[in-house]
Image (spheres, coloured by chain):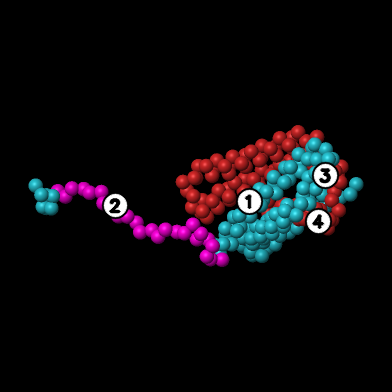
Amino acid sequence: MNSKEMRETPAYTEFHPRWYRERVSTYWWLWKWSYLKFVLREISSVFVAWFIVVTLVLIAGLSWGPEAYAEWQAWMRLPAVIAVNVVSFFFVLVHALTWFNLAPRAIVMRVGGKRLPDAAVAGANYAAWAIASAILAWLVMRRG
Amino acid sequence: MAALTLPVLIFLFGLAFPLGWLEAPSYEAMHGLVGRPLARVCLFVICWLSLLHWAHRFRYTLYDGLQIKHLNEVITVFCYGGALLGTGAAGYLLWNFR
């Protein structure tokens, strides 16, 4: 029997269409500012990790003694390290600011059945940031 | 956590002290500060959460940004393994702080 002939019961064929999907460039995030911002924000995490490593070395140095701490301080004064820290500081700042600005969208606070305005939620986050920074700075710079 | 605490710490330790804008704390002061149990617990939490934050974000940055999906397992192990290792190091250093 010829396969082209019609049958009483049509055979089941697994016909799966191939989707048309345009290949996305690896650098898709470079061409639009909003995408680039997203990726830059994600990259800020690398600088967070860098500073944690620096902090761990500091803790180890403090544990080892004054010479190790002085060595760590000298290392932190190297121009290359300062350059990385300048970049880190800006990345972490961007990360913090964008995080506080999106907090009102993540946290919906209701007081007495009414939604707190976005500014109040963001403001509370900024206040917490200011207080945490002030406490840390005070702890570190306290004399005596 | 990273957002709340790291900007001021990077500013102080990464810029202000090395560049001489502010007087760096002495060894004794820093040693006394980190020596407190509460400070050690806080430092541990900051290290742990920040490293986890890095692992998660970096993993997805590689995943979405570079489309290297065939290396997925390697990246996952590298990121979370690195975070685990760092957290372990933080725990060890802070626990045995002298």
Q: Closer to the observer: label 2 or label 3?
A: 3
- Label 4 with label 1: CB-CB less than 8 Å: no
Residue B76 in which image quadrant:
top right
Image spot of residue A4 (x, y percent)? 13, 53
What residue did someone put label 1 on? Answer: A46
Q: Nearer the viewer, residue A105 or A48?
A: A48
What residue did someone put label 4 on? Answer: B19
The colour chain B appears in is red
Query: Bounds of the magenta span?
Result: A9-33
Q: Is residue A142 highlighted in magenta?
A: no
- Label 3 with label 1: CB-CB less than 8 Å: no
Q: Amino acid at mark 4?
A: Leu
Q: Amino acid at mark 3?
A: Ala
What residue did someone put label 2 on? Answer: A16
Q: Is residue A27 highlighted in magenta?
A: yes
Q: Amino acid at mark 2?
A: His
In the picture shown, does residue A113 fall above or below B41?
A: below
Q: Nearer the viewer, residue A114 or A142?
A: A142
Numbered disc 1: secondary structure = helix
Q: Closer to the observer: label 3 or label 1?
A: 3
Q: Closer to the observer: label 4 or label 1?
A: 4
Image spot of residue B8 (x, y percent)? 75, 55
Residue at left offset 61%, top offset 57%: A41
Residue B33 in which image quadrant:
top right
